[in-house]
Image (spheres, rainbow, N blue to C red):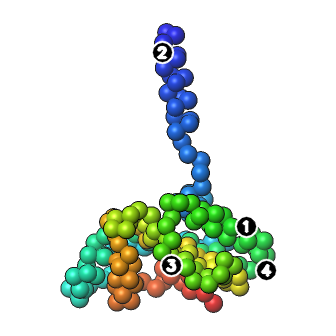
Amino acid sequence: MATLVRFLVGCTLALLFSCKSEPSLQKYFVENTENKDFVAIDLTPKMLNIDNTKLSVSQKEALASFEKINLLAFKVNDKNKAQFDVERAKVTSILKDAKYQQLMKFGSGKEGAQISFVGTDDHIEEFVIYGNKKENGFAVVRVLGKDMNPTYIMEMMSVLKNGNINLDQLKPLQELMK
């Protein structure tokens, strides 16, 4: 009986210490999806309504590596300016984690955009596009997939331009950009 109790206590302690409570972008998305100050949009390849027969080989490869896009945007207004600064600091802190490798950066720390990725150069699991502007708010876009590479993000942009996306899904984002 004592051996069983020690075993259960050991398993419980191992489980507690193995769980990381570090902030992550995924946790941040989950925590804020229902928050009224945020707009959350998820897109899958099927929602893009893309005619594969009109795509180039490289566009097809980029699309095949893509699983989904998650977008989380914070729209700033007179009532939530303090919260905007807090939330922007949280995202900036998360993106400073070594697992997010910065690909490009535009603008300054207070306003601008950056593109980061998770994975290795030829086996990227996630692209993160983060942009913020003091007057409008900020948006974080996660492009999730398997074995993506940096050229795929540009190919995906061209595919999205040619897609027949249901724009009703993007109305909250359009409101943010006004």
Question: What is the three-letter code of the residue carrying label 4?
Answer: Asp
Is 38 situated left or right of 54 in this image?
right
| Residue at image mark 2 | 4
Of residues 59 and 46, the one nearer the viewer is 59
Task: Please name the residue shown 52% across and 39% down the image.
Answer: 18
Where residue 34 sits, quadrant-wise, is bottom right
Of residues 107 and 152, the one nearer the viewer is 107
Considering every residue shown, the one lying at the far top of the view is 1
As helix, strand or loop, the secondary structure at mark 4 comes to loop
Badge number at residue 86? 1
Real-space CA distance between mark 4 and mark 2, rounded to the nearest whole angstrom: 59 Å
The tag earlier along the polypeptide, 4 or 3, is 4
| Residue at image mark 3 | 104
The tag earlier along the polypeptide, 4 or 2, is 2
Front label number (4 vs 3): 3
Count neighbours of disc 3 (C-alpha within 10 A) and say few if under 14, some if 14 to 19, many if 20 or more: few
The tag earlier along the polypeptide, 1 or 4, is 4
The tag earlier along the polypeptide, 3 or 2, is 2
Real-space CA distance between mark 4 and mark 3, rounded to the nearest whole angstrom: 31 Å
